């Protein structure tokens, strides 16, 4: 059978020989909104929860995701901006802040990759810097001890908006709601303390109410005081299925069941070989983002089995700290990674090394990418020249009765193991 899965802005292709049991693990197909602009307009003007619009004369700050997230700003922003003008907010009193969290900074020349041209021409746009403590405001600490430092431009605004997507997240449970601001506009100390909770057994894919990392994010959001949020739920082609707007918590309460209905995919038993893609650009923009697909796919792959991750990664590792940490002389195996990480303590960036090794130590992992082979090996992954050669090599080690899984949109898929 011919196989095509997302890879960067295109597809990677291969032939799977006949005779193998092949199962696709996919989000459930849902019709995209026939008129996405109308869907967003309806959500914005019929908001969930107890919210109020800004008043004339107020300043407004809008947190938006960076280039690593496929947020459809071209549909989400126009109704919001129209509402601002209708409320009497002047264009010069509205500020967009790109919520990078601890991702690499975006150069102003890259802003047009995430914002429509007319927005760039009309409004001020700045990029958050989690390391610049002079531009952060300290709000105290959460009940879980997280020191809360948030972008001061966002805190100085009279009215605060967060825009993003609701989708599965490997240890926050779900993205969306306040997260674009509570993590995306937070300082490094805030993000480090919150993300260190990923080791908690309830900090996992699909868990919200009992997830300490996610509930810490909710508390940070309440401390910030986010007045309005707009979120989209997307299909695997990055089209809007559903739009939600209003109170961030109300959005999550209604959005999570909708995401689960789409993203949850039953799996009868673990696979001998899993072939996965994070979902194409921008979900495979770098290893930092592609690792999420690895985690989701590995969760339904047999211990000792094989996993092929097909991710273009034109942006390299996605983290200078992750990259330099992996180049230490003492790190030569996945066991070295986990031992060093446990000894040194949690740090964002190198935590990606731990997440990769956690799965790759259990499942033989091949990365098909645009990256240099030697660089991939230094990250303790096996490079694959292309998808076909990676599959051919994996099949040489498998019997004919082996089960093969394919996850073309791994980042957006929540596999549910039925066995046991």
Image: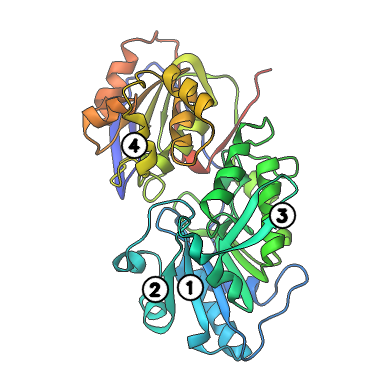
**Image quadrant occupied by the N terminus:** top left
| Classed neighbour count for the residue bearing mark 1: other residues with Cα under 10 Å, few (<14), some (14–19), many (≥20) | many
- Which of the two labelled residues, at mark 2 and mark 4, occupies the earlier sequence position? 2
The residue closer to the viewer here, 19 or 248, is 248
Calculate the distance from the C-alpha at mark 3 to the C-alpha at mark 2: 32 Å
Q: Judging from the image, what secondary structure is the residue with disc 1 in?
A: strand
The alpha-carbon separation of the residues under discs 4 and 1 comes to 30 Å
SS at circle 4:
helix
Q: What residue is shown with label 4?
A: 323
Extreme residue toward the right, this view: 50
| Helix, strand or loop for disc 3 | helix
Which of 28 and 150 lies nearest the eye of the viewer?
150
> Residue at left 35%, top 76%?
117
Q: Is residue 188 left or right of residue 51?
A: left
The numbered disc on residue 96 is 1
Q: Is residue 268 above or below residue 196?
A: above
Residue that carries the numbered disc 2 in the rendered image: 116
Residue identifier under label 3: 219
**Residue at 48% over, 17% down:** 362
Circle nearer the N terminus (1, 2): 1
Q: Which mark is residue 254?
A: none
Q: Is residue 355 above or below residue 128?
A: above
């Amino acid at each position: 059978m011919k196989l095509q899965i997302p890879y960067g802005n295109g597809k990677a292709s291969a032939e799977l020989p006949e005779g193998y049991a092949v199962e696709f693990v996919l989000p459930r197909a849902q019709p995209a909104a026939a008129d996405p602009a109308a869907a967003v307009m309806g959500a914005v003007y019929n908001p969930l929860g107890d919210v109020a619009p800004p008043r004339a004369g107020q300043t407004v700050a809008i947190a938006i995701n960076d280039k690593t997230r496929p947020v459809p700003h071209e549909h989400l922003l126009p109704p919001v901006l129209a509402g601002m003008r209708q409320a009497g907010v002047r264009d010069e009193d509205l500020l967009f802040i790109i919520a990078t969290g601890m991702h690499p900074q975006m150069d102003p020349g890259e802003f047009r990759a995430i914002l429509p041209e007319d927005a760039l021409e009309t409004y001020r746009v700045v990029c958050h810097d989690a390391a610049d403590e002079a531009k952060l405001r300290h709000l105290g600490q959460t009940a879980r001890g997280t020191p809360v430092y948030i972008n001061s431009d966002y805190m100085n605004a009279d009215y605060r908006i967060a825009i993003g997507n609701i989708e599965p997240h490997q240890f926050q449970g779900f993205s969306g709601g306040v997260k674009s601001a509570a993590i995306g506009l937070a300082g490094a100390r805030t993000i480090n303390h919150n993300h260190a909770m990923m080791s908690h057994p309830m900090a996992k894919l699909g868990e919200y109410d009992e997830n300490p990392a996610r509930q810490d994010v909710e508390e940070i959001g309440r401390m910030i005081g986010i007045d309005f949020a707009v979120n989209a739920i997307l299909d695997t082609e990055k089209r809007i299925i559903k739009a939600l707007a209003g109170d961030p918590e109300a959005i999550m309460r209604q959005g999570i069941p909708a995401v689960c209905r789409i993203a949850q995919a039953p799996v009868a038993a673990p696979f001998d070989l899993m072939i996965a893609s994070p979902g194409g650009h921008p979900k495979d923009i770098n290893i930092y983002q592609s690792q999420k697909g690895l985690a989701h796919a590995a969760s339904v792959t047999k211990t000792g089995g094989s996993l092929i991750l097909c991710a273009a990664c034109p942006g390299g590792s996605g983290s200078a700290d992750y990259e330099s940490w992996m180049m230490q002389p003492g790190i030569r195996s996945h066991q070295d990674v986990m031992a060093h990480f446990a000894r040194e303590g949690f740090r964002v960036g190198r935590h990606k090394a731990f997440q990769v090794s956690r799965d790759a130590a259990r499942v033989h992992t091949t990365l098909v990418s645009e990256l240099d082979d030697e660089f991939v090996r230094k990250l303790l992954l096996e490079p694959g020249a292309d998808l076909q050669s990676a599959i051919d090599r994996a099949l040489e080690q498998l019997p004919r009765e082996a089960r093969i899984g394919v996850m073309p949109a791994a980042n957006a898929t929540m596999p549910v193991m039925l066995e046991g």
